[in-house]
């Protein structure tokens, strides 16, 4: 009987050590990050299409004036705010929120240049590449969560 | 049936290794590809500035966008790391769940 209790204590010590090391509460499944969210996946993809459409209209000489694109900027900003709000309330989701903040800053940089009549056609391709990288990074993480769940 | 700590540890390790290996290959490719693309865009911006096609303010705006994008890529790598750690520990616990719960006679591992 003594040996049995020693064995139980050792097994629990091993499992608790693993759990504590990786912040696992008790001996249940470990959760370090929010799970996959299909709505976020779809909304990010939709937002990327909107931004791509905007950039397509700007990729010309001369770049259309800001007034003609203001409504599109406003819609994109509104969609992004909604997406951020959704992801802010999800627990263990700080990384995605930080990524959305980075995306918001990039779009702000683009819009500021356009509003101040500083946006010219040669700036559009690098801006597009940069925004694409950000969208890809957001989706990459979301897909990784989906694959893990499967 | 008596269980050995060595046996449990080996079972956990055997479950964790393929999870870590797959994820490392995946994240390594992603980080490398995206870093290369961003470096190319950075070189493009530099060329536009040096050739006088954009001024300092325009270059600064594009570079700030670059910085945000790189941050987003690194955040994705960090996030994938957390997903991987989560998968690995749950795979490890899953590998020994039957053994341990059976030996103990109660569901220690949920």
Image: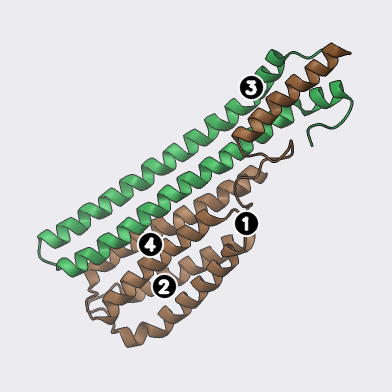
Chain colours: A brown, B green
- Percent from the top left, x then y, of residue B77? 46, 44
Q: In which quarter of the image is residue A113?
A: bottom left
Total labels: the figure holds 4
Residue at left offset 74%, top offset 13%: B4
Q: How far separated are the C-alphas under marks 3 and 1?
A: 31 Å
Structural distance between the alpha carbons of marks 1 and 4: 26 Å
Front: mark 2 or 4:
4
In the rendered image, the quadrant that contains the N terminus of chain A is: top right
Q: Name the residue under label 1.
A: A91
User: Left or right of A106: which side holds A147?
Assistant: right
* Quadrant housing the C terminus of chain A: top right
Tell me, yes or no, whether dots 1 and 4 are on the same chain.
Answer: yes
Q: Nearer the viewer, mark 2 or mark 1?
A: 1
Q: How crowded is mark 2: few (under 14 residues within 10 Å), some or many (20 or more)?
A: few
Asked if one can make out residue B6 in the rendered structure from this viewpoint, the answer is: yes
Residue B14's disc is 3
Mark 2, chain letter? Answer: A
Local crowd size for mark 1, using a 10 Å CA cut-off: few (<14), some (14–19), many (≥20): few
Observer-side mark, 1 or 4, equals: 1
Mark carried by residue B40: none
For the residues bearing labels 4 and 3, Cβ distance under 8 angstroms:
no
- Tag 4: Cα neighbours inside 10 Å, few (<14), some, or many (≥20)? many
Which residue is denoted by mark 2 in the rendering? Answer: A53
Same chain for the residues under marks 2 and 4 in the image: yes
Look at discs 4 and 3 and give the one toward the viewer. Answer: 3
Q: Can you identify the residue that label 4 sits on?
A: A131
Q: In which quarter of the image is residue B49?
A: bottom left
- N-term mark: 2 or 4: 2
Left or right of residue A114: residue A9: right
């Amino acid at each position: 009987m003594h040996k049995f209790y020693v064995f139980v204590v050792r097994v629990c010590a091993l499992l608790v050590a693993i759990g504590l090391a990786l912040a696992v509460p008790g001996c249940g499944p470990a959760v370090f990050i929010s799970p996959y969210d299909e709505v976020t996946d779809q909304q990010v993809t939709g937002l990327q299409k909107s931004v791509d459409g905007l950039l397509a209209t700007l990729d010309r000489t001369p770049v259309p004036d800001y007034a003609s694109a203001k409504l599109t900027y406003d819609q994109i900003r509104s969609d992004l705010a909604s997406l951020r709000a959704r992801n802010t309330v999800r627990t263990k989701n700080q990384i995605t929120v930080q990524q959305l903040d980075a995306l918001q800053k990039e779009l702000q940089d683009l819009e500021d240049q356009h509003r101040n009549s500083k946006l010219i056609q040669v700036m559009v391709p690098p801006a597009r590449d940069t925004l694409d990288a950000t969208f890809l990074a957001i989706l990459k993480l979301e897909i990784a969560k989906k694959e893990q769940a499967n | 049936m008596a269980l050995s700590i060595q046996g449990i540890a080996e079972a956990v390790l055997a479950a964790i290794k393929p999870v870590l290996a797959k994820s490392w290959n995946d994240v390594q490719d992603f980080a490398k590809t995206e870093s290369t693309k961003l470096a190319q865009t950075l070189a493009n911006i530099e060329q536009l500035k040096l050739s006088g096609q954009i001024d300092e303010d325009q270059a600064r705006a594009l570079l700030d966008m670059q910085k945000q994008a790189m941050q987003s890529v690194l955040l994705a790598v960090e996030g994938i790391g957390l997903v991987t750690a989560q998968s690995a520990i749950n795979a490890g616990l899953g590998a020994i769940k039957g053994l341990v719960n059976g030996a103990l006679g109660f569901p220690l591992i949920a």
